[in-house]
Image (spheres, rainbow, N blue to C red):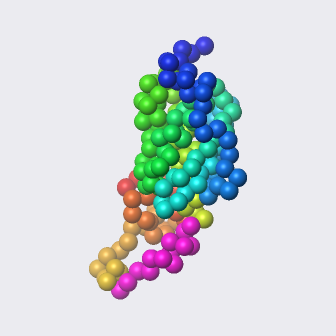
């Protein structure tokens, strides 16, 4: 049985933001078939910020602690900031996880990113309407294109809004 530090135990025994937002703007679910962990995050976005975030996790103590920590870290962040939240940051904020439980921290950030991607995919038509390219935008420049689906990429978002694939910029 792994030995958890005090902070991990605190977030496991007293998890924050447990539940589901019934009127969520985005939902993301990830799982690990090897260990059986399953995480679902729901988010509410207002003015490009995560106004509210909840989670439901089926898994070990580390998975629950990670989910709880992700919600605390992400609440109040802009969409762009939350998409930059890394698995390593989550584990560090918890004071570390046993080596055989590090995969749990990967699930937390991934579930959050999927919820944001779900939110943004519903908004892609709105973004296109709000930002029409001008003639000056197009002259002498080619926009960045997704290597998977050839659609225009949005600045500072590390994935393609159209096909939801991560992009290394």
Horizontally, is 35 left or right of 144 in the view? right
Q: Residue at x 57, y 49 (%)?
A: 52
Of residues 45 and 147, the one nearer the viewer is 45
The reply to whether residue 34 is visible in this rendering is no
Q: Residue at x 50, y 18 (%)?
A: 6
Question: Where 46 sits versus 99, above or below?
Answer: below
Q: Position of residue 115 (x, y in %)?
A: 59, 51
Q: Quadrant of the C terminus?
A: bottom left
Q: Residue at x 63, y 52 (%)?
A: 27
Question: Where 70 sits versus 1, above or below?
Answer: below
Image quadrant assignment for residue 139: bottom left
Q: Position of residue 156 (x, y in %)?
A: 39, 59
Q: Main secondary structure of the magenta part?
A: helix
Horizontally, is 7 left or right of 156 in the view? right
The reply to whether residue 136 is visible in this rendering is yes
Q: Residue furthest bottom?
A: 135
Of residues 96 and 152, the one nearer the viewer is 96
Q: Quadrant of the N terminus?
A: top right
Tell me the magenta residue range.
123-135
Q: Position of residue 8 (x, y in %)?
A: 52, 24
Horizontally, is 154 left or right of 111 in the view? left
Of residues 21 and 106, the one nearer the viewer is 21
Q: Residue furthest left?
A: 140
Q: Is residue 125 magenta?
A: yes
Q: Residue at x 60, y 31 (%)?
A: 15
Of residues 99 and 25, the one nearer the viewer is 25
């Amino acid at each position: 049985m792994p030995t958890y530090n005090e902070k991990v135990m605190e977030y496991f025994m007293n998890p924050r933001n447990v539940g589901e937002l019934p009127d969520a703007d985005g939902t993301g679910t990830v799982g690990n078939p090897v260990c059986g962990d399953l995480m679902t995050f729901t988010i509410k976005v207002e003015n490009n910020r995560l106004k509210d975030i909840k989670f439901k996790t089926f898994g070990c103590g580390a998975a629950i602690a990670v989910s709880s920590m992700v919600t605390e870290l992400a609440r109040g962040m802009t969409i762009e900031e939350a998409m930059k939240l890394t698995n390593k940051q989550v584990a560090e904020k918890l004071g570390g996880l046993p080596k055989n439980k590090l995969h749990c921290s990967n699930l937390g950030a991934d579930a959050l990113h999927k919820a944001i991607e779900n939110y943004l995919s519903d908004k892609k038509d709105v973004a296109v309407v709000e930002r029409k390219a001008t003639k000056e935008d197009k002259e002498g420049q080619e926009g960045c294109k997704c290597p998977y689906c050839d659609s225009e990429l949005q600045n500072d978002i590390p994935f393609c809004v159209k096909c939801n694939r991560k992009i290394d910029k």
